[in-house]
Image: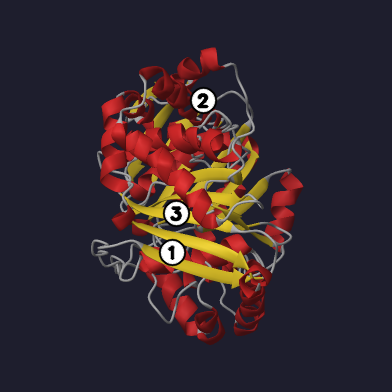
């Protein structure tokens, strides 16, 4: 699967592929549409799922979303920073992820280890994520413990320690994480496909960074990155849960309002020039399984073609999960599953399309069946793409795919944590209206739209084909 999202856990670091997160909630499809709609009303102060929502910007530039949800006595508190691997250049690749690690090494007020214990005592959870365009930290706690989240996140926005010994220790951790990923064929292949797809833009490299940079970055590099991007005018605070919005805003002002704004951070991403022909990469390594990835250049989240591509994705391979939590819907009714898995060209197949600031990728991936070659599987995949390009999908087929996409979106919007997530997440690449209008824009997609975007984007000249071959197969 293409490109990895780096996730912190309290006991260890994990790396999960983007698109692998699908909420575990389930509901009858007949109520999905109405359930989803109820969650998506926004405004300065408007009713939303039994509560109200307030949005504002503090004098220091911090954007604040507060959403009352009085269904349970909990709150979910998220701080989002507009910084990710997109903001890195050769020499400091992986620095955003490493800085995220350092946020858990404590401050003078909350020394290392104190934060874990403080959260655990409340029965709450916390975590952090680093991706292409953003870094985020969250706490989900009993509602009467919200001050802990306000205190610790506002404190580490300005006072995180970058002790040289801790930096050295984390260097070992991130290098070990990088080396662990290299044991995964899907990671090795994704990294090569990524690099081939982006020769100019900083989406070129994986979030974890290049080993050479992880070995040579300094404490000063990390601290400079932290001070440049961890500023209120580069951040979004999103809180949802059992509180009164006006009272919570006062607490937010007390916790965050005195933090000074910083200079507008530099944006280093350069436009990727159009690709002029199909690119192919082959990776050889241990194992017995052949992996196939086909990555097409795709528009960014605010482009008019993004939602038709989401519909196409659901039709071809099953809907992409856009949330961070849970597990997924079956894709056994998708066209590629029927054409590749049911016919034994592939053991599994899937697709990934994520919203990003700049144009990114729509990636189709498959584990090749032992009795087939990667080229045979690619030909079968291309046959389904050609079918979609030659004729619009029947209305019934499209509606079935859209129904699955709506269901997955609704499942990923139910909980208090998910509601807080969406407020901040959508602001990273668009605005909150992108989320509130999601269903409306998806429902507007027509069969002709799907055919058009298939013709526009799913062309050989616009893609990178990657194959992972076991070394023993290559030597035979």
Tell me if label 3 and label 1 are in contact, CB under 8 Å.
no
Q: Quadrant of residue 100?
A: bottom right
Q: Please report whichever mark, 3 or 1, sits nearer to the chain's N-terminal start.
A: 1
Name the residue located 45 percent from the left edge and 26 percent from the top edge.
401
Where does label 1 land, which residue?
194
Name above or below for residue 45 compared with residue 472: above
Where does label 3 land, which residue?
294
Q: In the rendered view, does 447 fall on the left or right side of 72?
A: left
> Element type at marker 1?
helix
Q: In the rendered view, does 410 fall on the left or right side of 398?
A: right
Label 2, label 1: how far apart the Cα atoms are: 30 Å
> Element type at marker 2?
helix
Taking the image as drawn, is residue 445 in sight?
no
Callout 1: 10 Å neighbours few (<14), some, many (20+)?
many
Q: Quadrant of residue 98?
A: bottom right
Q: Which mark is residue 379?
A: none
Name the residue located 44 percent from the left edge and 32 percent from the top edge.
315
Where does label 2 land, which residue?
407
In percent of width and height, residue 106 lies at: 62, 67
Name the residue located 59 percent from the left edge and 46 percent from the top edge.
346
Out of 466 and 15, give the one closest to the viewer. 466
Query: Which tag is nearer the camera, tag 3 or tag 1?
Result: 3
Q: In the rendered view, does 398 fall on the left or right side of 286?
A: left
Label 3, label 2: how far apart the Cα atoms are: 26 Å
Label 3, label 1: how far apart the Cα atoms are: 11 Å
Name the residue located 60 percent from the left edge and 54 percent from the top edge.
16
In percent of width and height, residue 270 lies at: 26, 67
């Amino acid at each position: 699967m293409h490109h990895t999202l780096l996730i912190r856990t309290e006991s260890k670091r994990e790396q999960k592929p983007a698109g692998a997160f699908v909420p575990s909630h389930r509901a009858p499809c007949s109520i999905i549409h109405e359930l989803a709609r109820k969650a998506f009303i926004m405004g300065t102060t408007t009713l939303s799922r039994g509560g109200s929502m307030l949005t504002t910007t503090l004098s220091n530039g911090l954007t604040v979303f507060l959403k009352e949800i009085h269904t349970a006595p909990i709150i979910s508190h998220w701080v989002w920073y507009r910084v990710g691997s997109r903001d890195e250049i050769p020499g400091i690749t992986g620095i955003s992820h490493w800085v995220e690690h350092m946020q858990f090494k404590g401050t003078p007020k909350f020394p290392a280890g104190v934060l874990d214990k403080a959260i655990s005592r409340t029965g709450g959870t916390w975590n952090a994520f680093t991706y292409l365009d953003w870094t985020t930290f969250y706490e989900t706690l009993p509602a009467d413990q919200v001050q802990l989240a306000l205190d610790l996140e506002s404190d580490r926005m300005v006072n995180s320690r970058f002790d040289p010994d801790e930096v050295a220790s984390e260097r070992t951790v991130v290098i070990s994480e990088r080396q662990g990923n290299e044991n995964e064929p899907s990671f090795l292949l994704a990294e090569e496909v990524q690099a081939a797809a982006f020769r100019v833009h900083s989406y070129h490299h994986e979030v974890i960074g290049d080993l050479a940079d992880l070995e040579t970055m300094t404490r000063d590099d990390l601290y400079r990155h932290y001070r440049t991007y961890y500023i209120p005018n580069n951040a979004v605070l999103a809180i949802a849960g059992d509180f009164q919005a006006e009272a919570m805003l006062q607490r937010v002002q007390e916790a965050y309002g005195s933090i000074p704004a910083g200079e507008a951070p530099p944006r280093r991403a350069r436009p990727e020039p159009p690709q002029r022909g199909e690119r192919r990469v082959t990776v050889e390594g241990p194992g017995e399984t052949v992996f196939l990835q086909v990555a097409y250049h795709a528009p960014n989240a605010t482009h008019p073609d993004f939602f038709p591509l989401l519909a196409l994705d659901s039709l071809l391979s099953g809907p992409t999960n856009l949330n961070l939590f849970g597990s997924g819907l079956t894709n056994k009714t998708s066209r590629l599953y029927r054409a590749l898995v049911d016919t034994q060209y592939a053991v599994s197949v899937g697709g990934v399309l994520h919203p990003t600031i700049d144009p990114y990728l729509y990636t189709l991936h498959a584990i090749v069946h032992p009795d087939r070659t990667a080229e045979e599987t690619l030909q079968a995949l291309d046959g389904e793409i050609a079918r979609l390009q030659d004729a619009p999908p029947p209305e019934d087929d499209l509606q079935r795919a859209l129904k699955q996409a709506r269901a997955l979106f609704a499942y990923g919007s139910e909980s208090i944590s998910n509601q807080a997530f969406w407020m901040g997440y959508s602001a990273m690449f668009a605005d909150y209206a992108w989320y509130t209008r999601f269903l409306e824009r998806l429902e507007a997609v027509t069969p002709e739209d799907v055919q058009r975007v298939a013709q526009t984007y799913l062309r050989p000249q616009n893609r990178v084909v990657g194959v992972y071959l076991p070394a023993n197969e290559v030597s035979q």
